[in-house]
Image: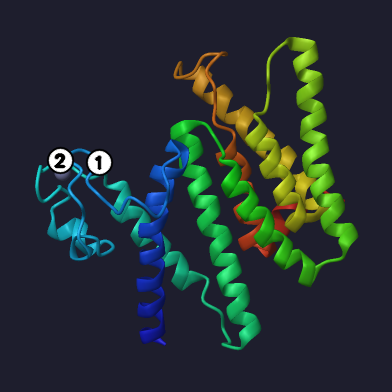
Amino acid sequence: MITLKILAFIFGSMIGSFLNAVIYRVPRKINIAVPRSHCTKCKKQIYWYENIPVLSYIFLRGKCSKCKAPYSVQYPLIEAFVGLVAIFLMPRTYDSMALMYYFLYFSIFCALLCHFIIDIKHQILPDSINIYLALIFFCIAFIKYTPIYYLSGAAIGFLFPYLVTLAFYHLKGQQGLGGGDIKLFAALGIILGPVGIINNIFLSCFFGAIFSLVMMGLGKMSRTTKLAFGPFIIIVAVFQIFFPALFKQFSSLWSI
Ligand SMILES: [Zn+2]
């Protein structure tokens, strides 16, 4: 069992290393595969032995081996974190179905993590990641749920926030949600279904509003500061997708 856990960690941290490239490159519209990893300052190519997840950062003391420019601590942290998540999601049995779900749910987590960090840094939720998520959600929903469940979930996830945003825009002349947020809701509707996506919309707006009020109260934000909303949607979605029992307990607080 311990060997499998070590293998899962190595696999996860290697994927984490790839996600670092996605997080850096996708919002800058740089191809993910080429050019190969290089120091963003002196452009020196990073050799495979300098690109071993977590370990290389420690051996290189967090600096480029040529120009000594510091590498962000975000790189090893994400590698280690994704490695731990790969262990956490490990199935109890190893039949083909369990393994398939393992990879599907692990990919969902990876895409949500990229979305989360890219939105905080650049205030965008890239279309490519939304499409990727929608495809994986569809694979799972197609096996587990009825067409009514995932089609109505996606329709509500798109239409409800879209119409509210449109109304808000006509009334106040301000755009509430971005297009990326609405597309993410639509994608999540596929796996969360109609009730799940409504829960997500209300809870993420609720937490987003509380966060804004606290930040404004502390003087760290003004009414015009643009707030990345994706992270709130994602935190709620992670609870709904990965901790459904916990979420059910929590949601029994307001449902009858
Ligand atoms: Zn360098």
Which residue is nearer to you in this view: 211 or 46? 46
Q: Residue 154: x percent and y percent?
A: 80, 49
Q: Residue 218: x percent and y percent?
A: 46, 19
- Structural distance between the alpha carbons of marks 1 and 2: 9 Å
Q: Residue 136: x percent and y percent?
A: 65, 61
| Ligand 1: quadrant of the figure | top left
Question: Quick one: label 2, few (<14), some, or many (20+) residues within 10 Å?
Answer: some
The residue identified by callout 1 is 40
Question: What number is the disc on residue 111?
Answer: none
Dots 1 and 2: beta carbons under 8 Å? yes
Question: What number is the disc on residue 69?
Answer: 2
Q: Residue at x 48, y 70 (%)?
A: 88
Could you say which quadrant of the image residue 205 lies in?
A: top right
Q: Residue 256: x percent and y percent?
A: 87, 51
Amino acid carrying label 2: it is Ala
Element type at marker 2? loop
Residue 82 drawn above or below residue 102: above
Q: Residue at x 78, y 40 (%)?
A: 158
Element type at marker 1? loop
Left or right: where 90 falls relative to 58:
right
Q: Residue at x 90, y 58 (%)?
A: 148
Tell whether circle 2 marks a residue whose Cβ is less than 8 angstroms from ligand 1: yes
Q: Disc 1 or 2, which lies upstream in sequence? A: 1
Tell whether circle 1 marks a residue whose Cβ is less than 8 angstroms from ligand 1: yes
